[in-house]
Structures are given as C-alpha cells and as structure tokens.
Amino acid sequence: MRIRNVVQLHTVNKLQAFGWPLIIMSLSLTLVLVIGALIVNVGGAEAREGMNEGMQYSGAIFALLGPLIGFGFTAMGQYFPLALGFGLTRREFATGTLLVFLGNALFYAVIVTIGKVIEVATGGFGLSVRFFDVVYTGLGEWWQTLIQTFLLIFTVMLVGAAITTAFHRWGQSFLWIFWIALAVLILPVVAGFLISEDFRAFAGQVGGMGWVPWMGVILGFAVVGGGTWLALVRRAQAR
Amino acid sequence: MTAISTTGLTKRYPEVAALDGVSVALEENRIHGLLGRNGAGKTTLMQLLTGQVFATAGSMQVLGGSPVENVEVLSQTVFIQESQKYPDTFRAVDVLRIAAGAYPNWDQGYADRLVEQYRLPAKRLIKKLSRGQLSAVGIVIGLASRAPLTFFDEPYLGLDAVARQMFFDDLLADYTAHPRTIVLSTHHIDEVANLLEHVVILDQGKVLLEADTDELHDAAITVSGKATAVDAFLAGREVLERKTLGTLATATFTPRDGDELAAREAGLDLTPVSLQALFVHLTTANTASAAAATDTHRASDRAIV
C-alpha cells in the first residue's frame, strides 16, 4: 500500500497544511488579546469578570477549527481526483486520508490543549480572556479538552468527506435531499423551543447531560460519517 | 505481448453510452494513437483502463490484470489527462514532488530539464497557470515517470507549435531510449501521424477502425481528374468521399490491385490519403450512415403508425 504517497499528497504544501491554520489562529488570538487589554483597561474589574464569563462562548477558536472543517470537503473534492490521476487506489486513498485526518486532529488538539493549559495557568494571559478554554473545546480538565477537540476535528473531517463523496456520486439531487432532511430535523426542534415549555425543559436536560454523553454523541456522528464515507469512496469515480 | 485488451467494454451514463462494446488489443512497447471526434469515448476508455471509472459491461486486461483497485497494475501506469483537476493551493512543484514519490521509475534529472525546457513556472500556483503551462505539467509527469504504460489524453492543449514539436521530439527520443507502451489521444492527427505505430479510431463509443499505421497507408487513396473519368473509374465501387469542382472531381476509395495501372490509362492521378484525411472520411461516412439509419427507422415508424 502506497500510504506514504497519500499522506504526501495531503501535506506536500506545508504552508497550506500547517502554516496558514496556525498563522490565522495566532492572528485571531492576538485580536482577542487586544480586545481583552482594551476591556480590562477601560472597564475595570467588573468588565473583566463579565468578559471572562462571556468569552466561554467566544467563537474565536474557529479561526483554527474553521479551515479544518473544510479539510474533509477538500480531501474528497480536490485530492481524490488527483490521487486517482496518480494511479493510487481508492483503498490506498481512504487509508492514507484516514491517517491524515487522525494526525491532523491529534496535532491541532494538542496545540489547543497546550494553549488552554497556558491560558488557564496565566489567568487568561494575564487579561482574563478566553481563547482556548471555551465550550467548544471543553471547559473541564486539560485531558477533556484534548479528547473533545480531537473528536470534534476528526468528526467534522469525516462528515465533510462523506458529504462531498455523496455529492460526487449523486450530484445536486443529493444536496436537495440533504438540505430537506436537515430542515425536517431542525424545524420541529425550533418549533418545539418556540411553542412548548415541556420541550424547552427536555432540551435543557439534554443540554446538561454531561461531558461523557456529549462525547458519545460526537463519536456517534464520527462513526456514521466515517462509515458512510468509507462505504461510498469504494465506488467513487473520477468526474 | 498484449499490454491492453478489452472485450465488449461498455460504459453507460444515464443519458448516454460513452462506450459501447469496445474490443481492442494493444501490443506492448508501441505508440498507439487513440483517435476520435469530441465525445467519441477516448477519455472514457482511458479512464476505464486506469481504474478511474467502472465499466458497465465487458472485460479488460491491463498489463496482465484488471486495473480496478489493482496496485500492481496502477503503479506501472501513468494517465495524463487534459481535464486533470489539481487542488487550488497546489503549485506545479508540489504536483511534481508527489509524482516523484508515486512513480518508481521517476527520473528527477530529466524532470528538471523538462521543466526548464517548457519554461514551467514551478513555484506558481497551479490555478494561475495558463492552459499551455498546465499541459506542460502533465507532459513533464508523463515523460519523467517512465511508466511502462503511459496514457496521454490531449496532452498539449494550449501549447504553441514550438512546444508541441518539442513534445513530439521528447516523446520519441525518450520512447526510443526507454521503450514502453504509450497510448496517445489527440485531435492533431497529422502532427503525430509519424509517431504512431498503431491506431484505434473511436466514433460514437464504438471502434470504427483498429489497424497498424503501415496498413493504413494502403487503406484509402484519392483519385482525381475529369469527373466523367473518375466516375467511370469508380463505377460500382464504394466511395468514402467525392468532391466535384466544375468538370473535375476527386474521390477517396479503398484501393485494390491494378488500380494504379487503370488510373494511369484513364489519365487520372492517384495520391495517398493522410491519416487525418482517412480519419475525417471514416468518421464523416459513419455519421452519415448513422443519420441515414435513424431516418429509415423514423420513416418505418411513421409507416407503422
């Protein structure tokens, strides 16, 4: 199996594979630090505390996670046709790409975890800001952040690859079915929130079900996304 | 030994049969021309032979095995296709690095020389390359990979005449030094006619002709002279194409023994038909007969109604 060639395919341009995500993350972190410094200097202790609490939900970390979400899409949309062009088999591509997904998820999860440990240890870089220690990457212990971030990145890559492969195979009709199915799932939830007190209570219970069950949900998405992708890629054709 | 053989190979898409019962046998270590009009099925045939798409029916053997998911076969195969997509963030140098790792016979020194020769800006983003420069990327990979089985699908789109000639010279020189099986699909038939040793002409997904180019020299000739003399000369024979200009006429036909002497006695000139002209005659005649068959079907359908 020519796995090394597949890994090389994904990582040959180091700046694109690793450089830009880290550069964009650094820029986003810098911006958060500047905002934090301004708020602390202008607003005082009360503003500092409010900022620290509010920033639990800050999406600034998606400056890093965002491009990684797209990685699954480009793996199938752009790298798969080239892999076939280089005479690599679908099995080799799937195995190599899965390893790259795992490696990427682990690499960036470690970066985020190190960032979180430093952030917590320094009291939000001395400014009470939150960049790494947010709900999306886990507010608990460092190992929870490591696992959660790893699972999150790995899952979105698998789901992205599955969606692109399905689109590759069935074209626009898949997208119509996908969006309609998504709407059928989301609309009742939104309606339930709007009109039913019981539903809101139920949703609250689900939301507060704890870290482990939530990781199980993410893992479930990973299994479904990965299983779908691996099943479809075996019969995927060049376009 | 046969490098490629197919039997009844068929590829159907929902709207069209891209290939319909194609059976060919291509010998190893020769340069084969795959000719056909747009949509004839050339690219589809090459995609099937390189395992990029799956056949609807029929069978194929490439280097002794099925190419589908076959590492042994595919690692000896390079397919340079005109429509190859590259990731947006890739530079030419990235593609060449991957190719260097993917092909066991890769010659880096040769690749570097070709990059220089075709003036390829290797560090520029692929998406910013011109059509001709994109073709040059494929040519470098196709030649420097030295794969035992090399497919070139319209490899020189956008290249100027000088670069095209350079490609033909490089291909022939490297093929001579490192013999391998080359399948070349092209529209520039006259430019490659001297390179090709064997030709497959596809039309509307079917094999219209498969022959060695030596045999094709005698496949058709053109007779010209007074229209009445040309008509008398060809009376009762199948004519591939006939043109009239005033009292003069030219006609292309399949020759037989004694034609040369008979033409001379009738005061007519005989000239050989180029591969491109033969291709045009054959595909035009096939299109015309297909149209006639369709008309006949429609007429009989109307008669039944």
Image (cartoon, helix red, strand yellow):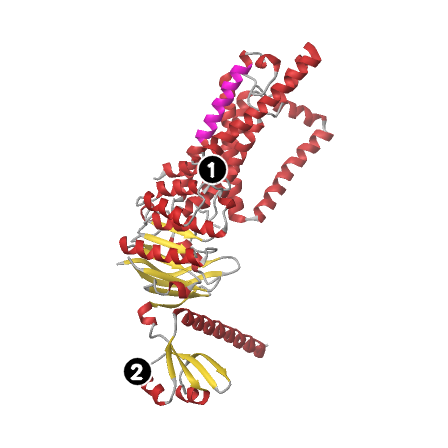
Q: Quadrant of residue A195?
A: top right
Q: Chain of mark 2?
A: B
Image position, residue A207 (x, y; %): 62, 23
Q: In the depicted view, which residue is nearer to us: A200 or A34?
A: A34
Circle number at residue B257: 2
Left-right relation of A73 to B264:
right
Q: Which residues are magenta?
A: A102-119
Hey, what amino acid is under mark 1? Gly
Image position, residue B294 (x, y; %): 52, 73
Circle number at residue A160: none
- Dot 1 surroundings within 10 Å: few (below 14), some, or many (20 or more)? some
Q: In the depicted view, which residue is nearer to us: A178 or A95?
A: A95
Q: Residue at x 45, y 36 (%)?
A: A13
Image position, residue A59 (x, y; %): 61, 25
Magenta-highlighted stretch: main secondary structure? helix
Q: Quadrant of residue A127?
A: top right
Can you identify the residue that label 1 sits on? Answer: A227
Residue A22 appearing in the image: yes
Is A118 a magenta residue? yes
Q: Secondary structure at mark 1?
A: helix
Residue B58 appearing in the image: no
Q: In the depicted view, which residue is nearer to us: B42 or A151?
A: B42
Discs 2 and 1 lie in a common subunit = no
Hey, what amino acid is under mark 2? Asp
Image position, residue B74 (x, y; %): 35, 48
Q: Is residue A149 above or below residue A44?
A: below
Q: Residue furthest top?
A: A45
Query: Given contact means CB atoms under 8 Å apart, are the residues at marks 2 and 1 in contact?
Result: no
